[in-house]
Amino acid sequence: MAFIVYDVILLILFAVFVSIFLYLGRKNLKREGLLFLYKAKWGIKLINYTGNKYKTALKFLSYISIGLGYILMAGIIYLFGKLVYIYTTLPHLVKTVKVPPVMPLIPYVDKLVPGLPEFYFTYWIIILAIIAITHEFAHGIFAAYNKIKIKSTGFGFFPFFLPVFLAAFVELDEKKMAKKPKLAQLAVLSAGTFANTLTAIFFFIVLWAFFSAAFVPSGVIFDSYATSKIAVKDITSINNIPLENPSYDRILEIVENLENSNAVQNAKRKYIEVKTSKNTYFATKEILEMQKKNDGWILVYASAPAIKAGIIGAITEINGKKVTDMESFKAELLKYSPGDKITIKTAISENEFRKYEVVLEQHPEFSNESVPWLGVGFAKKDGKGVLRKLYSKLSSFKDPHVYYKPLFNGVATFIYNLLWWIVLISISVALINMLPVGIFDGGRFFYLTVLGITGSESAARKAFGFVTYIFLFLLFIIMAFWALSFFS
C-alpha cells in the first residue's frame, strides 16, 4: 500500500485527536482576531530557566540575532523585488506558473507545484513542531533574559481550517516589553528568525551527512536533448505542413492549429517536427512560444539519436555496463562508433526502469568521423547572480548531473526529503518573518529601527505604515499580473 494512504489516515486521526483535545480543554480556548488560541503554561519554567541560566551567552547572541535580523530583512526585500521584477517584465515565464505566487504551505502542496518532492502530512506536522516550537521558544528565552514576563504558551489555528492548521505562540507581557531598551526589544523580535536560521544550519549538516551515507552515484541525469539554432526563413514545413513565407507568427499559428487538432490531441506529448531544406528538427509548443522573435532565429532540438529514441530518465547502463557519473558515461560511450547499436537503460524512479535500442551517429561538432553522438545535453548549473551562487554552494555535496540511488529503497528518500523540507522551510520562515510588514516580527523590528534613528514616534509610525502598504500594494500587483497571464 502506498505511503500516502497511511498519511491520509494519520491526518484524519490527528484531526479527530485535536478536535477532542480542544473540546475537553475549551475553557483555555480564546478568540483573538482571526485566530483561536489555546493558552497554557507549557515550557514556561524551562524558558525562564534557560533565559536566566545562560545570561553571558544570551547577551553575546543578542547582538548576533539583531545583526542577522537586518541581514534577513535586506535579503527578503531583495527577493521580493526580484519577484516583482519577474512578474511585471517576464510574462512568458509567468504564463508557465500554474499556482499563485503566494500560497500557504499545506500538506500535498507538491501535487499543485510540479517538481517539488513529496510533502506529506507527516512531514508537515514534524516540521511545524520543529520550526514553530524553536521559533517561539527563542522569543521566550530572550524575553526571559531581558526580564519580560511570559504570560502563556500554546498553539493557535484559523477556525476555517479547524482542527489541523496549527501555529505555536509565546505570549509576552507587551507593556513590559515596550518599556525595555530598543536593543532588548530588537533582540526578542529577531530571536525567532535566529532560531530558524540555526535550525536550517543544523539540519543542513544532518542532510549532508545522511545523503553521503545513504545514497551512491548510479547514473547521469541529462538536462535536455542536443539543440540547434536555425533561421526562421529556412524552415520549409511544420509537421509536414508546407510553410510559405516563413515567419515566427506564422509558425505559432500553425502550431496552435496543430494543438487544437484531433490528431495532435491524441498524442499531446509528441514533438513537433520542424524541417528545413537540409535537416529535420524537433520542438514543443512551449519552447517555440518562449523564443525571441526579433532576431530571425529559433532554438530547436537536433534530430539526434536520443530524442528519436525518446530516452527519458537517468542513464544508468550502456550495453549492461554501469554508468555512475559523467566521467564513466563519457568513457563508456566513447568505446563505440557511429552506426553502432547500443542498449541504454534508464531509471525513471527508484522502482521503474526502461531500456532503449539506440543507433549512434557521427558527432556533428567533431571532424573525427569515429566520435559517436547520442545527443543529450548537460547545462551548467552555477549560473550568475547571488541566488544561483548561494544555491550552488548549499547543494555542492550533490552533483546535479548525477543520479544517486538510495541504499534503503524508499526509506532513504523519505528521510532525505523530510530533511530537505526542514531546511527549506526554516530558511523561508526566517526570511518571510523579517518582512517589514505589520503582521510579521519584521514590521515592529523596522518600526523600532526608524524610531531609534529619528527619535520620533510619529515618523516611525508613518514609515511603518507606508512600508506596509507598499508591500501590500506590490503583492497585489504580483497577483494581478499572475491572473492576467491566463488571458494573454
Image (cartoon, rainbow, N blue to C red):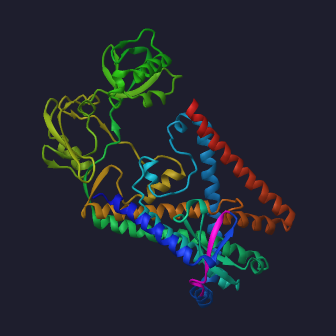
Q: Nearer the viewer, residue 358 or 11?
A: 11
Tag count: 0
Seen in the picture, residue 160 relative to 223 is either above or below; the reply is below
Q: Nearer the viewer, residue 116 or 394?
A: 116
Q: Position of residue 315 (x, y in %)?
A: 24, 45
Q: Position of residue 184 (x, y in %)?
A: 71, 78
Percent of width and height locating residue 480: 64, 40
Q: Is residue 46 above or below residue 128?
A: below
Q: Is residue 304 left or right of residue 342?
A: right
Viewer-proximal residue among 349 and 265: 265
Front residue of this view, candidates 207 and 469:
469
Quarter assignment of residue 68: bottom right
| Figure quadrant of the C terminus | top right
Is residue 443 shown left or right of residue 254? right
Quadrant showing the N terminus: bottom left
Give yes or no for residue 374 being in the magenta stretch: no
- Residue 273 pos. (x, y %): 33, 22
- Magenta span covers which residues? 34-44
Q: Is residue 22 left or right of residue 204?
A: right
Residue 58 as seen in the image, left or right of residue 322: right
Q: Can you name the residue that lies furthest to the top here?
A: 244
Which picture quadrant has residue 341? top left
Residue 251 is drawn in which quadrant? Answer: top left
Seen in the picture, residue 234 relative to 470 is either above or below; the reply is above
Image height of 24 relative to 482, above or below: below
Q: Residue at x 70, y 51 (%)?
A: 472
Residue at image position (57%, 36%) is 90
